[in-house]
Amino acid sequence: MANQPCAAPGISPALSSRPLRRSLIATALIAALLSGCAVGPQFRAPAAPDTGAYLPDALPATTADAAGTPTGDAQRFLEGTSAPQRWWTSFGNEELDRRVEQALAHSPTVASAQAALRQAQENVAAARGSLFPAIDANAGAARSNGLAAGTPGASPFTVYNAGVGISYTLDLFGGVRRGVEAQSALADLQRYQLEGTYLSLAANVATTSILEASLREQIRATEEIVDLYRQQYELTRAQSDIGAKSMADVLVAQSQMATASAQLPELRKALARTQNQLAVYLGRFPSESQLAALELDAITLPTDLPVSLPSTLVRERPDIRAAEAQLHQATAQVGIATANLFPTITLSGSYGSQATSGGDLFGSGSEAWSLGLNLLQPIFRGGTLRAQKRAAEAGLDRAAADYRTTVLTAFQNVADVLRALELDAAGLRAQAEAEQATRSSLDLVRVQYDDGAANYLQVIDATRLYQQARIAVIQARAARLTNTAALYAALGGGWRGTDASAFADAQTISN
């Protein structure tokens, strides 16, 4: 069998004839010759901030330590290093690792950000379609009488037609290309926002888990303090029965026990609220949450902390990269608005057949074709196009200001956390010393009370001080862990150069 010429499915090979090929070739050549420069400003990524430090004074090599206290090790700052991708594993707790990875795989917040990225990527593909000619096939039939054909008295007849049309708008001033550029920038924005979603979700799960462990420890400590008050109350009541203590002493002891006990419902309420929040982070209903107990003592304090160079922070924080993408998109919008002020040239062509009988289509004498060129030059639009250009320029100024605000805020975040870590260490050491002192004081006062050398008010006061010191130590330990997680997040969380979507897919499969 002889080879047949190639043709689109459902279209007659006759449509691949020489006039159509000439039209397509002519359109492509003219487009290549006339597609010129793209008007408007060219985007360039902002330069890194001209600053070499996060703090006004030198960053210490290490923090203070609280020897003998859990979570009291000194932390060392490693300047010039970036945060690792799975930074939460630095805390050495398998339950924390499981929670974070489950959240990254199942959180609807992540699913929403992923869908937004896919949507933006498809919008880019749709915008790129405008760079190519539009080709459409058409076919139809129309019933007409003789008057419509200019022949009075003729019988009604049917006209059949089929053909292919092509049109192409020359991108002489880059308006279409700027549109593609703007959509690409929006896709970049969604990608960085997805990375930011991963980063904030991991940080929220880590810090909320630390808070949960801290609350559980505070409840345990408060229960022990309540038990101490109960023992003192029972002892005082027994002494009152034999006349060694007055009823006033009994009432004071009872009041202190009740006051301490009243703190437990509030702590338990905070713990329940924290656990419910964790369930939502993990993509679960609170009623379905099955969280294993996470103890504060089981969380290891990372001792080697990364501190990125200030010049690299702008490339490592997703929020800064997102602000940069917004700046890029605003720049492209200025180009679009500028291109709209210039002429638009559209090339068109068609080839087909027309006959009064369907069997005669593409037969001899039925051929019909056309070539066209249209020019549109805006002359008067009531100032609309100029106003749109000025609005786009104002949007660019706004995006530039927002970018700088984002950078300044990012540097503030890092500076705040670095200072907090330095002071947290000193605070924990002071609180640990206070706890030891108040514990020794309480033991001494209780011995004196048993010997009759101290009154019950002294015991109550010593117990209150010890209670406050112990709770303060727990909170100081949690603060060091929380601010360590905040440092990883402030440095970008290690998502630079990674495919967050692929990581999510892998986690979903593994779970």
Image (spheres, rainbow, N blue to C red):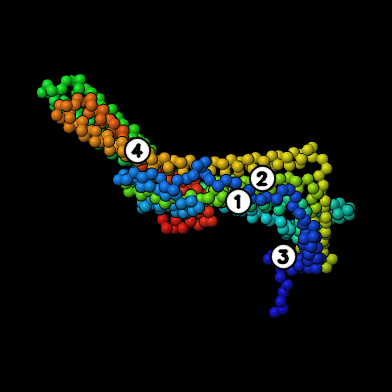
First along the sequence among labels 1 and 2: 1
- State which quarter of the image contains the C terminus: bottom left
Label 1 vs label 2: CA separation? Answer: 13 Å
Q: Circle 2: is it few (<14), some (14-19), or many (20+) Cα within 10 Å?
A: many
**Residue under numbered circle 1:** 187
Label 2 vs label 4: CA separation? Answer: 51 Å
Label 3 vs label 4: CA separation? Answer: 85 Å
Amino acid type, mark 4: Ala
Which of the two marks, 1 or 3, is nearer to us in this view? Answer: 1
Label 3 vs label 2: CA separation? Answer: 44 Å
Q: Nearer the viewer, residue 337 or 484?
A: 484
Q: Where is residue 99 in the image (x, y as percent from the top left)?
A: 40, 49
Residue 330 — which label?
Answer: 2
Tags 2 and 4 touching, CB below 8 Å: no
Amino acid type, mark 2: Ala
Residue 430 — which label?
Answer: 4
Q: Name the residue at 36% across, 51% down.
A: 93
Label 1 vs label 3: CA separation? Answer: 37 Å
Quadrant assignment, res 280: top left
Residue 11 — which label?
Answer: 3
Q: Name the residue at 75% across, 50% down.
A: 39
Q: Does the rendering let one see residue 124?
A: yes
Q: Does the rendering let one see residue 211?
A: no
Amino acid type, mark 3: Ile
The kind of secondary structure element at disc 1 is helix
First along the sequence among labels 4 and 1: 1
The kind of secondary structure element at disc 4 is helix
Q: Which of 486 and 70 is in front in this view?
A: 70
Q: Name the residue at 36% across, 40% down.
A: 428
